[in-house]
Amino acid sequence: MRKKLLLTVLTVAFSIVLLVGCTTKQESTSSNEGNESNEEKVVNVYTSRHYDADKELYKIFTEETGIKVNVVEGKSDELIERLDREGEDTEADVLIVADAARLHRAKSQELLQSVESEVLNNNIPENLRDKDNEWYGLTKRGRVIVYSKDRVNPSELSTYEDLTNPKWKGKILVRSSSNTYNQSLLASFIEINGEEKAKEWAKGLVDNMARDPKGNDRDQAKAVVAGEGDIAIMNTYYLGKLLNSSDPEEVKVGEQVSVFFPNQDTTGTHINVSGAGVTKNANNKDNAVKFIEFLSNEKAQSIFANANYEYPANPNVEPSELLKSWGEFKDQNISLNKLGENNKKAVEIFNEIGWK
């Protein structure tokens, strides 16, 4: 009798252990499945881009992949600072900012991580991406000479270097040296011509400025039309924005200026990018890589090019009709990694020669 009772107790105990074990495994499996599900369905993006074209791309990406795109918009420097401040607690999987120098800074602050993607390596030329695969250019912007159609004969224009010619004294408009686009422009000259010649150019340009630098790129075109100067240095896509503005006055400004691509017989026109990288602490890395790969494909690049007047980074995609109307041009043949690497020296030169 005692033997039978003992056998019954052991059987019940074993059943309880087995039941607890199964329950624990089921809970664990369920939890893991939840994580995988979340990872497959979400990508969190910090971006300085705020264009309708980008919102359309997020929608298409979700339709094609089932991955929801959560977006935090902000200014480039503020987003980099936020990412740094949040550290391991950040929700961001992807950082998108304008200018290769900013992407380089995010990398230098160890906010990004390297990814291996044959798709990205095939879609984005080597000079438009980080040498360690921590960021990739998505759109190109030419920093060109914009001139008054009424007062400047384009045959008078040739190179960035020629803008220091005394014939342009009091005629050049450009934004301040604190602007990253100008810092990257000078950084490219440091790479191509060396520090001393870059410094000579910056000083010569200051001597020919029509006024103290102020305003954004669009303001430079407006100042040309207002007669404050004859030529401006600005990014091409801003002229596209003016010509397609809902404000008729901005359209008039765009119609009274034209684009000149400098240095076509020498070192090429300076270009920059807006680009993306996977954050160091991304919780959804696979989705982040898929998202950036999607933005680099021909369909997405065509939308970038046609809706926002930027040049596609993917060489298999043609520019928009507006950009084609300005003509083809030769790029500076340098790696954009150099824009970030030479940024500190460019800022030092600006401060030294008095570019406000």
Image (cartoon, rainbow, N blue to C red):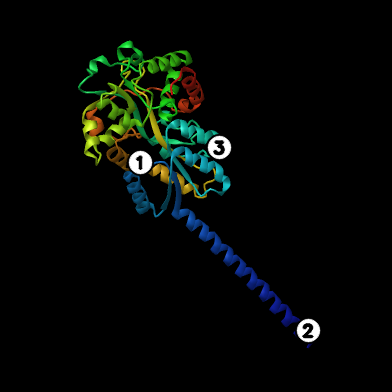
Q: Where is residue 33 in the image (x, y as percent from the top left)?
A: 52, 60
Question: Image point 21% across, 33% down: which residue?
Answer: 252
- Quadrant for residue 139, please give it: top left
- The quadrant of the rendering that contains the N terminus is bottom right
Q: Is 219 on the left or on the right of 115, as rendered?
A: left
Q: Quadrant of residue 298?
A: top left
Q: Mark 2 to mark 3: distance in Å? A: 68 Å
Left or right? Give the position of 141 relative to 199: left
The numbered mark, 1 or 3, whose residue comes first in the sequence reads: 3
Among the two numbered marks 1 and 2 on one chain, the one whose residue lies closer to the N terminus: 2
* Residue 102 location (% of width, % of height): 47, 33
Judged from this view, the residue extending furthest toward the bottom is 1
Which residue is painted at 44% across and 31% down in the image?
100
Q: What element carries label 3?
A: loop
Q: Name the residue under label 1.
A: 297
Above or below residue 91? Residue 194 is above
Left or right: 31 as drawn, with respect to 76: right
Amino acid of disc 1: Asn
297 relative to 352 in the view: left or right: left
Q: Which residue is under mark 3?
A: 110
Between marks 1 and 2 in the image, the one whose residue lies nearer the viewer: 1
Choose between 24 and 92: the one closer to the eye: 92
Q: Are marks 2 and 3 in contact (CB under 8 Å)?
A: no
